[in-house]
Structures are given as C-alpha cells and as structure tokens.
Image (cartoon, grey):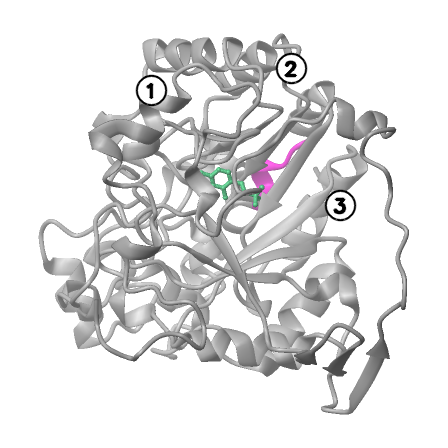
Amino acid sequence: MEPFPSRRAPLYKDIPDEKWNDWRWQLSHRLNSLEDFEPVLNLTDSERKALSSKGLFRVDITPYYASLINPDDPHDPIRLQVIPTAGEMVEFTGMMEDSLAEDRHSPVPGLVHRYPDRVLMLVTTQCASYCRYCTRSRIVGDPSATFSRQDFEAQLDYLRRTPQVRDVLLSGGDPLALAPRVLEELLTQLRAIPHIEIIRIGSRIPVFMPMRITDELTDMLQRFHPLWMNIHVNHPNEITAELEQACDKLTRAGIPLGNQSVLLAGVNDCVHIQRKLVQDLVRIRVRPYYLYQCDLVEGAGHFRTPVGKGIEIIEGLRGHTSGYAVPTYVIDAPGGGGKIPLMPNYLVSYSDHKVVVRNYEGYITTYEEPLSYATHDPKTCSFCQNKRVEPGQSGVMGLLDSEDLAIKPQGFDELHNRGGGQHRLRADSHKWKPLGIGSGEEE
Ligand SMILES: *Cc1c(COP(=O)(O)O)cnc(C)c1O
C-alpha cells in the first residue's frame, strides 16, 4: 500500500509508516484511558470526569482517528463523537436502552426482521472505535457478549427458511471488524442461499481505520457481488486523503457506496457543515443515503436536536446542491416502527384538478392535474399477477400488519404478535394524531 500523506498527533511522529498504515497496529494501539489521552489531547474537566468514571460505554479510538482531532479545541466535531464527556452521565427523560425495540423483533439473537423483504444481521459487537451516541450501546463494545458460531448458525438457519428475505444488511458492531476469515465464511454462507439477492455491509471502519481497506479485503469482498456498503461520515473533517483512497478501492471493486450520518448537536447541526459534508461525499463517489435523527438511546441525550433542525438542513440542501448529494432525513421510530422519512413541505395545497407547490427558493407554482387518466390495467399486468402484497399497503398503521402477506416468512407471525401484539404500532397506542385532527391533548 502506498504511504499516506497522513496527519498524525505528535506522539506518533516516529512510528514507521509500515506500522501506521497497518490496521492491526492501529487496532492494537487504540486509546482508551485517561492516561492514553493525556499526551494526545488537552482534556477538559468534563472529559476527565467521564474518563475516570466506571461503567461508561466502552471507549476506544484508533491513533489514526484520534490524530484528526484538534487537541486544543474542546468542541472539535471529531472529538465530540468519540471522547466521553460528563454529558453522557446525565440521565435525560425518555431515553431507552433499546430504543428501536430491536431485541423484541429478533427471531434469533442478532437478527432483526422488521421489514418484509430484508433483515438486519448483527454479526459482531466490536468496532474499531466507539461512537458516544451508539444506538446499540446495550450490546456493542462488550467483548464477552459477541456472537458465537451457534448464533451465526441460528441466524443463517432462519434466513435459509425465510424466502422473503432478498436483502441482508450486515451490521453490529462493525462487520469489517470481524476476523477476515470469519467475514469471508459468513459471506460464503449467505451467498449459498439462493433467495438472497443483495448483501449490504454497514461499516464505519473506512472512517476510523481506512488502512483496513486493503487490496486483499476488496479482492475478497468482490467475490460476493451484488454487495453494497454504507459508511458513516458525520463531518467534513473526517474526509481525509486516507478515507478517499479507501472509498476509491471499494468503488473500484464494484461496491456502490452510501453514507449514513447522524444529526448531532454541536457536531453537524448546521446547514453549512452539512452542505460541505454531502458535497465532499459525492466528490469521493459516496452517495448520501440517510441522515438520522438521533435515537432516544441512553447516554446520547446531549446529542439530540429538535426535528426542525433536520428539516431546515434538508431545506438547505434540496435544490441548492446536486440531487445526488441530498440524503433522506429519517426518524427511526422509537419502539420499533422502522425508519420514517421527513422533509420540508413542498406541497402547498392539493385539489382534484391542481396542486400548488413551491420550489427550493420559495417560488410558488401550480401543476394542473390531467382531466382524465387511463390507468395501467392490473388484470393484464404480469407484475400485478405475481404480486406479493406487502405489509403497509393496507391501513394507515399497517406497517407491522402481516395479514396481507401472501407468503409469510416462517416465524413472522409469532415474532410480530409476541406479547399479545402489545408492541404493534397502533394509532391509539401512541400520542399520535393524524395531522389537523389532534386536539393538542396528551394521550
Ligand atoms: C435500517 C434497517 C433496515 C434497512 O432499511 P432500508 O431503508 O432498506 O435501508 C432493515 N432492517 C432494519 C431493522 C433496519 O433498522
């Protein structure tokens, strides 16, 4: 691998390039204690307090990623993502350990089956570095709680007998943190299942440890196409020459890259930062995919922003920059309703003959609806004849209704009806009111 024009904290200036550019060296020299950070950063009292307390979510940072932090800036956007502060120890109301109710939607440990045709497969609890706002801090980071061979077998077994699943999303933890042979074995097993069309990997390793993206790794990955990957970049400062090179290797191996970022107070809750971020991403051929509203996960309360901030950011992107650069802003519904997209209102009003819409500059225009409309004929359409009716096609809150599934995955009913259906989203089980009907009262 060519040497990187690397930025390094002064502590690492004498480390030979072969070591610095070796991901194994980066992994085994991660920083995790007060003593480790002292020579690298000017720690604040709040950081000292957090780093000296027991029971916090695991801390571990690769020397590469730590070197991107400005040691004298307590508000550095990279620092805030990985160095704990006392804010993490504050108990905010409404926060949950498993805010997406993933455990309740797991037919077997580590496999979350929430949508009809795709599953989330948690394959490891380990990451190269740990994000302070981790949605899965309940399981991630604990080396004793990692998945066993039997867990993998049970996950694969479920997939083999569930033909609806055409898309498997590997996550964790970070799938690229798995031992290379374990990852290869897992991909081999998944590829042997005929109904699995695409495999996706969600990984932050290109950001935390870009040297992990070796030719050897991409050679291995490209044997399992179609393979897609989402990386996780939150701030333009994370887009280094090293990340660019890692992404280049991945895209040259035919892996389409997307980015998922999390909207974080003090890190990227600003339209100017976000615009630079998404433009830099498309420049390195990474398509912004989702911008997540911060989950209600314990320890992340101080990172939350109002939803209006996310909408303002999308308003400042759509039309103002390349459409390719605009992610979908989503809330992952607390309690497990899945991802819900949000965007500014461009539809001003709507009637049977015209719609009134506005553009990104606020310019208002109308679109005349057609006077007559000869629709496509479902009776003669071969796609309609072979259709699978999917949940969500009927009923306002039909998201988790499985009654309409023409072919139900084995175990789907038990899974979604467990506990007498108490966890099924219902209009009347939430503070939810249709727009315009709510009286403003709680419950
Ligand atoms: C995010 C997620 C997926 C994938 O959703 P897409 O919108 O297809 O990217 C699948 N399963 C679970 C449980 C998820 O949280």
Residue 315 in percent (x, y) is at 63, 79
Q: Nearer the viewer, residue 357 or 289?
A: 357
| Residue beneath the point at 58% across and 70% down | 343
- Indicate which disc residue 248 carries: 3
Residue 19 in percent (x, y) is at 52, 39
Tell me the magenta residue range: 210-214
Q: CA distance from mark 2 to mark 1?
A: 19 Å
Q: Which element type, helix, strand or loop, lies under badge 1?
A: loop
Q: Is 117 situated left or right of 357 in this image?
A: left
State which quadrant residue 152 falls in.
Answer: top left
Q: Amino acid at mark 2?
A: His
Instruction: Name the quarter where the N terminus is drawn.
Output: top right
Number of on-image labels: 3
Q: Nearer the viewer, residue 51 or 93?
A: 93
| Residue beneath the point at 26% across and 53% down | 429
- Indicate which disc residue 195 carries: 2
- Indicate which disc residue 108 carries: 1
Q: Which element type, helix, strand or loop, lies under badge 2?
A: loop
Marked residue nearer the N-terminal end (2 or 3): 2
Q: Is mark 3 within 8 Å of ligand 1?
A: no
